[in-house]
Amino acid sequence: MDARCFHFRQTPLIVAAMRGHTASVLALAARGAALDAKDAGGMTALQFAEERAEEESTSPPAFPPPPY
């Protein structure tokens, strides 16, 4: 559950949070994944999730609004 990739030291929970896979994050957390685990850069899954949410809230819409 808390195995890490060798180079970046990321757990499955961190990778799921980075990629925005909410269902996977919830499933891993429910099964006891270490919520305080940090990657090689010192970031936790929560920090990645917060960063992703901030990026998504400030990014332009995927499609332009319809003309009126």
Image (tube, helix red, strand yellow):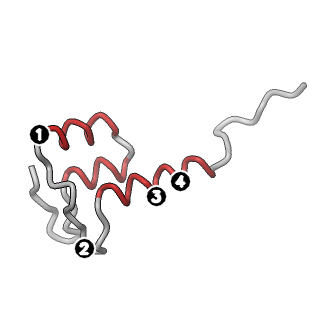
The numbered mark at residue 51 is 3
Mark 1, other Cα within 10 Å: few <14 / some 14–19 / many ≥20: few
Q: Please give the name of the residue rendered at 30% of the width and 74% of the height, measured from the top-left corner.
A: 41
46 relative position to 5: left or right: right
**Secondary structure state at the residue bearing disc 2:** loop
The amino acid sitting under disc 2 is: Ala
- Which badge, 2 or 4, is on the more N-terminal residue? 2
- Which badge, 3 or 1, is on the more N-terminal residue? 1
Q: Please give the name of the residue rendered at 10% of the width and 55% of the height, measured from the top-left corner.
A: 2
64 relative position to 26: left or right: right
The numbered mark at residue 40 is 2
Label 3 to label 1, Cα distance in Å?
24 Å
Q: For the view shown, which residue lies furthest in the bottom direction?
A: 41
The numbered mark at residue 31 is 1
Q: Are marks 2 and 3 in contact (CB under 8 Å)?
A: no
- Which badge, 2 or 3, is on the more N-terminal residue? 2
- Which badge, 1 or 2, is on the more N-terminal residue? 1
Which residue carries the number 4 mark? 54
Label 2 to label 3, Cα distance in Å?
17 Å
Q: Please give the name of the residue rendered at 38% of the width and 58% of the height, measured from the top-left corner.
A: 48
- Against 66, residue 36 (above or below) is below
Mark 3, other Cα within 10 Å: few <14 / some 14–19 / many ≥20: few
Q: Which of 17/62 is in front?
A: 17
